[in-house]
């Protein structure tokens, strides 16, 4: 799946990577729909350097662009590493080394997968509510509001809507599980040291194993009902590699999304 970039994203990309040229709009027109060229340009380290030094640039580009750059930088970094640290469920503030670098790297080398992860993260920059309206047995109109950031809300909604529309909600449930366990792993791993009221980021007492199991399950369901073979194949990949996708997001969160940046990108998620 191609990464959806805005005009401002493309201008930022070309101005930063092709910095010795002056005909930037011409280059934008040349590469706009060229996935291979865009992929090569997105992997240029100069993009991350500019994001770090130019706050106005961060505000000008889309969340899709920011996460696409960050994920590719993570991919470059881990190529040089021997192991990763992973969270051990139930061991407070303790992590263990795991030799999963090849698997995480292989996943991020797939352009469909890395683009999906970027757009999935961007989707949590603005969460929304869904209102379901129905008539009860007395004939009164009833409404229920569902938050598309809440995994339990989405599971409940997926059971109530027309079966034809369920795959998109199955996918969203997988996304929520991956987002929470990837970007907020400390809350998910150490849930039993918290109370439900002390962390809105964890739903109903789930830990990392719970999120991984549910993420795999619902991505698999979404893949089974996908209308496009390419999308179905991608969702199958995410189901089978949920743990590796989570580890990639754990690295992104730990190295580049400290608390203040999490709040900047994701508000009060």
Image (cartoon, rainbow, N blue to C red):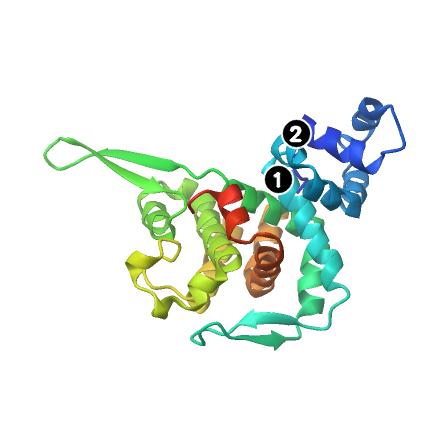
Mark 1 surroundings within 10 Å by alpha-carbon count, few (fewer than 14), some (14 through 19), many (20 or more): many
Quarter of image, res 187: bottom left
Question: Is there a contact, CB below 8 Å, between mark 2 and mark 1?
Answer: yes
* Nearer-N-terminus badge (2/1): 2
Decide which of 149, 268 is in the foreground and name it: 268
Residue 44 visible to the viewer:
no
Residue 84 visible to the viewer:
yes
Whether residue 167 is situated above or below residue 81 in the rendered picture: above
Circle 1 SS class: helix
Q: Residue at x 74, y 68 (%)?
A: 81
Q: Residue at x 36, y 57 (%)?
A: 199
Whether residue 210 is situated above or below residue 261 in the rendered picture: below
User: In the shown orientation, is residue 263 left or right of residue 39?
Assistant: left
Q: Residue 108: give its label.
A: none
Query: Which residue appears farthest toward the left when viewing the image?
Result: 138
Decide which of 171, 178 is in the foreground and name it: 178
The image position of residue 171, as x and y in percent, is: 48, 49
The image position of residue 44, as x and y in percent, is: 80, 46
Q: Residue at x 73, y 32 (%)?
A: 12
Q: How many marks?
A: 2
Q: Residue at x 47, y 64 (%)?
A: 186
User: In the shown orientation, is residue 218 left or right of residue 228?
Assistant: left
Circle 2 SS class: loop
Q: Residue 6: give its label.
A: 2
Task: Identify the residue under disc 1.
Answer: 64
Quarter of image, res 249: bottom right
Whether residue 176 is situated above or below residue 50 in the rendered picture: below
CA gap, disc 2 and disc 1: 9 Å
Q: Quadrant of the N terminus?
A: top right
């Amino acid at each position: 799946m191609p990464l959806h970039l805005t005009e401002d994203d493309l201008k930022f990309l070309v101005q930063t990577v092709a910095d010795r040229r002056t005909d930037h709009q011409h280059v934008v027109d040349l590469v706009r729909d060229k996935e291979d060229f865009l992929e090569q340009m997105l992997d240029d380290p100069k993009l991350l350097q500019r994001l770090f030094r130019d706050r106005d640039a961060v505000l000008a580009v889309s969340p899709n662009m920011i996460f696409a750059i960050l994920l590719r930088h993570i991919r470059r970094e881990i190529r040089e590493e021997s192991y990763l640290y992973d969270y051990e469920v139930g061991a407070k503030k303790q992590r263990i080394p795991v030799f999963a670098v090849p698997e995480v790297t292989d996943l991020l080398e797939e352009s469909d997968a890395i683009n999906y992860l970027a757009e999935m993260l961007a989707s949590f920059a603005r969460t929304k509510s869904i209102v379901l309206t129905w008539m009860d047995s007395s004939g009164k109109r009833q409404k229920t509001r569902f938050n598309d950031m809440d995994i339990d809300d989405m599971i409940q909604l997926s059971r109530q809507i027309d079966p034809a529309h369920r795959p998109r909600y199955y996918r969203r449930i997988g996304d929520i599980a991956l987002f929470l366990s990837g970007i907020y792993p400390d809350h998910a791993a150490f849930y039993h040291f918290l109370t439900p009221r002390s962390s809105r980021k964890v739903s109903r007492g789930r830990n990392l194993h719970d999120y991984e199991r549910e993420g795999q399950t619902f991505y698999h369901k979404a893949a089974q009902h996908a209308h496009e073979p390419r999308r179905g194949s991608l969702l199958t990949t995410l189901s089978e590699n949920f743990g590796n996708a989570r580890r990639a997001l754990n690295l992104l969160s730990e190295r580049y999304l400290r608390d203040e940046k999490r709040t900047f990108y994701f508000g009060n998620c």
